[in-house]
């Protein structure tokens, strides 16, 4: 008997057929995402009508009818208002921004000394970029330089008065520079203070626990502006004769205290999410309290609450705009201040200024939130379901 | 010390080293140290403050509240003149804070829920528009939004002479929003009474309908009945009494509109800014809450044959609310606290009035104490009410 191999099982795959034309392509997407049901069709039509109503005037105002060049308010006024533009063409006044750009960045920092904030900014960016890249080496040294050495160096550089540098009073600081200094300082202080407060709130020692609870709840219960008023009114009262507190320093203290309380609550959330076994495991290994916190608990807790921490940072960054109420000229304050300039007084100047300031704030906050999403994915060790 | 006694009982020795390594003794030592440091700081600060106040000739205490205020307040819910006391001025400020906070919370909730649901829409365009809204407003400071409305939009509206006419005899110009004023007639309180009766009757109907459905399975359209009752009863009273409520319409004068009620530009910009800003956060909370209800719940409801509207009302919303309420509470508190930004545009809220009083009288500590008390009690009250609501909504395991 001869054995014949009968191969009735197909050895190679048939190539897949292309999907029917109704299931692919732009048309399919439009049909399923925009017009799947009559209700959706109505909604889509309404949405398109809304966009058609909003977008053209907006684009028109921002770009097409906007004034782009000029040296004074004349460039942004219509003929009827005594300017150069045709009567029906009123748009954003961008020359106002370009004329005031340096002030918006540096405030009233003296012109011949502006290399100092620029130098600080360059050092900051050079240190921050490797800090933000997960793969960059020497993280420890990088962090020490960024968070401990840089603040001191920039303090002496910006304030001057030593090492042959001309003194520049903080009253002359302003613009984006102040916003960034306040928020960077707030972030640097609020994270460690927040960790200590959160640990204190979960401590077994009743006195320390109570102090932390009272501090956190009081600060979280009141608006930032009252904290800033307190810092600017009460701090001088607390000090002995002859001691004066710089206004900038008072704002720094107020903002940092405020952010610390919020940070403490975020971190407490992370601490509560750590299973008890982790604490007990660390104890049974013979680790001391601080070793346990530093090596076992904090790395896990902080990773859990990265979104919350970044949200607090974003909130802090936005909140620094409140210092304009207590008479400092941060990004928002300097934009408001410059609108009073008679050379640029037009009906569109305030909106232009606020649109620009809003865009800068938005850029920073949006950047932070995107970076936090990236870090979350990067640090995700896959324990989640 | 207790720690010492305890450890010596155990080990029988009283050496110093055993005390150092006793966690209880160390805990007590740390706490005493903390109390000592804080006590010292408080003592130094108090001394300095007393000295500084004496130097500035400021008498501490709340007697200044009886003094004459001497400044005007643009918008006030109760009668106020510049001859009134500081205390009354602060009360006006407090009521203004409450007014803007409550109105803002209502509007922000409506916009926020709408945007949050829109973000979950299967319609791509609607979802994207909602997303753009959220991403814009979450990432700019609320103060900037307030300034934008105040200096960018309302101040460049037409002047009073060429006001924009709106429906119901109201006008909009750069001095604010003018609308008809209610004039309460003699029997107008009956309208409110009718409304109260209607509301309590509908509560009763809803309870009765639920009890009957539990007992017999028969359904009753309690929702529609109460809705009709709440609308119809006050309307009926209105006509029976021969319209006790009249309106005083704003009239265009030579330079300004006279008559009617007015909401100043400060109030409008603060109110709109707070509503739009907070709505973005509420939208995210609502979206998160609805998405957290597991898909199995919807599928189970579909399998039971419930219609989509019933599924949403009876299955999704009650479970989503449980997740939504705690963060929603903190957003309401944030809105209330952000209303203090009023001081930037000169709206007389508690902080604004307090700041004026402080600058006039120099009573820094008392004013700060009033701020702290009021805002902390507002926070605590909201937290208590929302916790009660939260407990009512919480999962009851049987």
Image (cartoon, coloured by chain):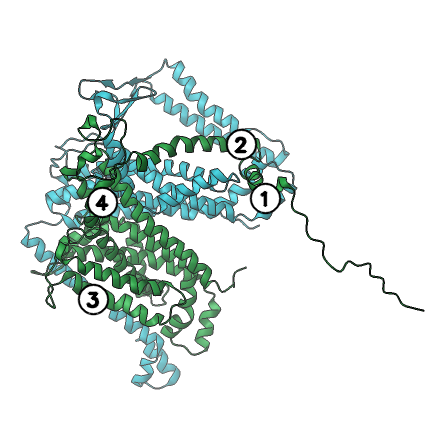
Chain colours: A green, B cyan
Mark 3 or 1: the one toward you: 3
Q: CA distance from mark 4 to mark 1?
A: 55 Å
The residues tagged by marks 3 and 1 sit, at their Cα atoms, a distance apart of 59 Å
Residue at image mark 2: A41
Mark 4 element type? helix
Q: Which residue is mark 4?
A: A98
Q: Are marks 3 and 1 on the same chain?
A: no
Labels 2 and 1 positioned on one and the same chain: no
Q: Residue B208, how many percent across, how many down?
A: 54, 32
Residue A272 spot, x, y in % from top left: 43, 61
Q: Quadrant of the N terminus of chain A?
A: bottom right
Residue B52 percent across, percent down from the top left: 8, 56
Which is more foreground, mark 4 or mark 1?
Answer: 4
Residue beneath disc 1 = B298
Whether residue A265 can be seen here: yes
Element type where label 1 sits in the image: helix
Q: Chain of mark 2?
A: A
Instruction: Give the structural element (helix, strand or loop) at label 3.
Output: helix
Write down the chain letter for disc 3.
Answer: A
Tell me the chain of label 1. Answer: B
Name the disc covering residue A153, or none: 3
Residue A2 falls in image quadrant: bottom right
The Cα–Cα distance between marks 2 and 3, rounded to whole angstroms, is: 61 Å
The structure residue drawn at horizontal position 17% and vertical position 21%, both measured from the top left corner, is: B255
Chain bearing tag 4 is A
Q: Please identify the quadrant where the C terminus of chain A is shown.
A: bottom right
The first of marks 2 and 3 along the sequence is 2
Most foreground residue, B340 or A107: A107
Q: Residues within 10 Å of mark 4 (few under 14, many from 20)?
A: some
- CA–CA distance between discs 2 and 1? 24 Å
Marks 4 and 2 belong to one chain: yes
């Amino acid at each position: 008997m001869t054995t014949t191999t009968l191969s009735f099982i197909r050895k190679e795959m048939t190539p897949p057929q292309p999907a029917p034309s109704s299931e692919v392509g732009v048309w399919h997407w439009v049909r399923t995402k925009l017009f799947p049901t009559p209700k959706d069709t109505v909604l889509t039509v309404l949405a398109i009508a809304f966009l058609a109503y909003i977008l053209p005037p907006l684009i028109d105002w921002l770009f097409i009818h906007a004034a782009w060049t000029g040296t004074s308010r004349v460039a942004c006024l219509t003929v009827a208002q005594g300017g150069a533009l045709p009567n029906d063409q009123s748009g954003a006044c961008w020359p106002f921004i370009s004329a005031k750009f340096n002030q918006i960045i540096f405030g009233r920092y003296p012109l011949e000394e502006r290399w100092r904030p620029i130098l600080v900014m360059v050092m900051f960016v050079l240190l921050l970029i490797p800090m933000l890249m997960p793969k960059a080496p020497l993280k420890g040294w990088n962090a020490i330089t960024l968070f401990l050495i840089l603040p001191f160096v920039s303090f002496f550089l910006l304030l001057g008065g030593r090492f042959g540098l001309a003194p520049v009073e903080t009253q002359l600081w302003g613009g984006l520079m102040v916003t960034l200094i306040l928020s960077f300082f707030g972030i640097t202080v609020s994270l460690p203070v927040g960790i200590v407060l959160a640990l204190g709130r979960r401590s077994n020692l009743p006195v320390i626990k109570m102090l932390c609870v009272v501090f956190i709840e009081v600060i979280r219960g009141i608006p930032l502006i009252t904290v800033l008023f307190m810092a600017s009114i009460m701090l001088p009262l607390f000090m002995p004769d002859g001691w004066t507190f710089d206004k900038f320093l008072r704002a720094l203290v107020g903002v940092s205290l405020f952010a610390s309380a919020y940070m403490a609550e975020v971190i407490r959330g992370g601490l509560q999410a750590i299973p008890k076994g982790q604490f007990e495991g660390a104890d049974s290994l013979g680790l001391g309290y601080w070793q346990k916190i530093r090596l076992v608990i904090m790395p896990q807790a902080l990773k859990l609450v990265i979104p919350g921490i970044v949200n607090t940072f974003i909130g802090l960054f936005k909140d620094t705009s409140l210092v304009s109420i207590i008479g400092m000229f941060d990004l928002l304050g300097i934009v408001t201040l410059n609108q009073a300039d008679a050379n640029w007084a037009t009906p569109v100047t305030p909106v232009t200024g606020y649109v620009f300031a809003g865009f800068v704030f938005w850029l920073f906050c949006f950047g932070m939130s995107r970076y936090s999403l990236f870090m979350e994915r990067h640090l995700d060790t896959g324990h989640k379901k | 010390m207790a720690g010492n006694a305890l450890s010596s009982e155990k080990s029988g020795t009283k050496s110093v080293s055993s005390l150092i390594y006793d966690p209880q003794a160390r805990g007590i030592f740390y706490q005493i140290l903390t109390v000592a440091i804080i006590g010292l700081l408080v003592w130094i600060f108090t001394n300095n403050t007393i000295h500084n106040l004496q130097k500035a000739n400021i008498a501490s205490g709340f007697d200044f509240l009886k003094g004459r205020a001497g400044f005007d307040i643009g918008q006030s819910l109760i009668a106020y003149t510049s001859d009134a006391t500081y205390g009354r001025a602060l009360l006006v400020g407090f009521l203004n804070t409450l007014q803007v906070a409550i109105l803002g919370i209502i509007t922000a909730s409506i916009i926020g829920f709408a945007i949050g649901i829109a973000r979950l829409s299967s319609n791509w365009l609607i979802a994207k528009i909602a997303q753009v809204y959220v991403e814009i407003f979450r990432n700019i400071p609320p103060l900037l939004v307030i300034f934008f409305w105040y200096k960018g939009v309302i101040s460049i509206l037409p002047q009073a002479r060429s006001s924009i006419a709106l429906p119901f005899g109201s006008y909009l110009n750069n001095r604010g929003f003018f609308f008809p004023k209610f004039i309460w007639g003699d029997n107008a309180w009956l309208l409110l009474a009718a409304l109260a009766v209607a509301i309590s009757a509908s509560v009763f109907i809803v309870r009765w309908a639920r009890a009957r459905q539990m007992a017999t399975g028969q359904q009753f359209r309690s929702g529609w009945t109460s809705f009709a009752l709440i609308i119809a009863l006050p309307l009926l009273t209105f006509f029976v009494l021969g319209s006790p409520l009249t309106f005083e319409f704003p009239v265009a004068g030579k330079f300004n509109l006279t008559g009617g009620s007015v909401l100043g530009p400060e109030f409008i910009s603060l109110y709109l800014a707070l509503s739009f800003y907070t709505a973005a956060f509420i939208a995210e909370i609502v979206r998160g809450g609805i998405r957290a209800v597991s898909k199995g719940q919807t599928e189970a409801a579909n399998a039971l044959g419930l219609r989509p509207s019933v599924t949403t009302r009876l299955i999704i919303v009650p479970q989503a609310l449980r997740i939504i309420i705690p963060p929603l509470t903190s957003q309401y508190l944030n809105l209330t606290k952000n209303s203090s930004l009023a001081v930037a545009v000169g709206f007389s809220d508690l902080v604004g009035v307090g700041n004026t009083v402080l600058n006039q009288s120099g009573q820094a500590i008392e004013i700060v104490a009033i701020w702290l008390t009021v805002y902390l009690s507002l926070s605590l009250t909201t937290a208590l009410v929302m916790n009660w609501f939260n407990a009512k909504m919480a999962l009851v395991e049987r």
